[in-house]
Image: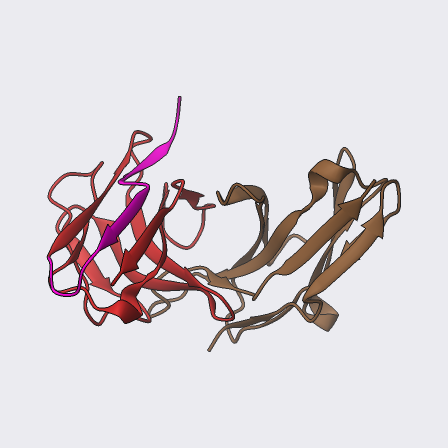
Amino acid sequence: EAQVTQNPRYLITVTGKKLTVTCSQNMNHEYMSWYRQDPGLGLRQIYYSMNVEVTDKGDVPEGYKVSRKEKRNFPLILESPSPNQTSLYFCASSLVGGVNEQFFGPGTRLTVL
Amino acid sequence: AQKVTQAQTEISVVEKEDVTLDCVYETRDTTYYLFWYKQPPSGELVFLIRRNSFDEQNEISGRYSWNFQKSTSSFNFTITASQVVDSAVYFCALSESGGGSNYKLTFGKGTLLTVNP
């Protein structure tokens, strides 16, 4: 089944404790991206990747890191999480950026205390 | 900069009513793509439709239909004979194909549709 998976689905952590949210797609898509969804602010892009080893900042990259060592994986790293990073996070992928529809993972609900 | 406006924050209808969700967009590109996504109470984002800027034909898929009008920069979504299972937040989104756009989806704030039995 074609899908985007994310882990964990739910996470409660404390300020400053490094964490990684994994994202994997099995559709051989070139483009992958991370979004966060916040009440009243909608969905905003954090980082994106056009292909392996090609990543760039989105609209709200502060406090996040990403890597794209393999085509299928695009982990999101929070080196020192803070309460303002409490949010619902979505990973997405598409065949080609900007042209094709993006398929979203199930979301990761992160709470930083 | 690209922008998507969904002026209707919440809509409530009774089952079997028709309902139209409005979407107005702004872009300077001549080539762009419009999308609708559905987010049911379970939280996932489900792709519904993609439309490119050169194709203004309306589209119908079962009870769903979309009206794309470049003259008014609108891409409205109509559900005919609504059902309780249509209750969700619906997002309109825009993607530009030009350089520097990050190829990101710019989302509207969403419209919460509640269909009551």
Q: Is residue A12 magenta?
A: yes
Position of residue B48 measured from the top left corner of the image (x, y, whole percent): 60, 42
Query: Is residue A31 at least partly visible in the picture?
Result: yes
Q: Name the foreground residue: B51 vs A57.
A: A57
Q: Which of B107 and B84 is in front in this view?
A: B84
Q: Report the chain shown in red.
A: A
Residue B115 falls inside the magenta stretch: no
> Which residues are the magenta region?
A1-17
Percent position of residue B38, x then y? 59, 46
Horizontal side of A112 relative to B48 (left or right) equals left
x and y percentages locating residue B114 in the rendered image = 73, 51
Q: Is residue A70 left or right of residue B63?
A: left
The percent position of residue A29, horizontal first and vertical second, equals: 31, 38
- Above or below, A64 against A26 in this view is below
Colouring used for the render:
by chain
The number of numbered discs placed on residues in the rendered structure image is 0
Picture residue at 18% right of the left edge, 60% below the top: A14
Q: Tell me if A83 is positioned left or right of B84 in this view.
A: left
- Position of the C terminus of chain A by quadrant: bottom left
Q: In this view, does A87 lie to the left or right of B71?
A: left
The chain painted brown is B
Q: In which quarter of the image is the N terminus of chain A?
A: top left
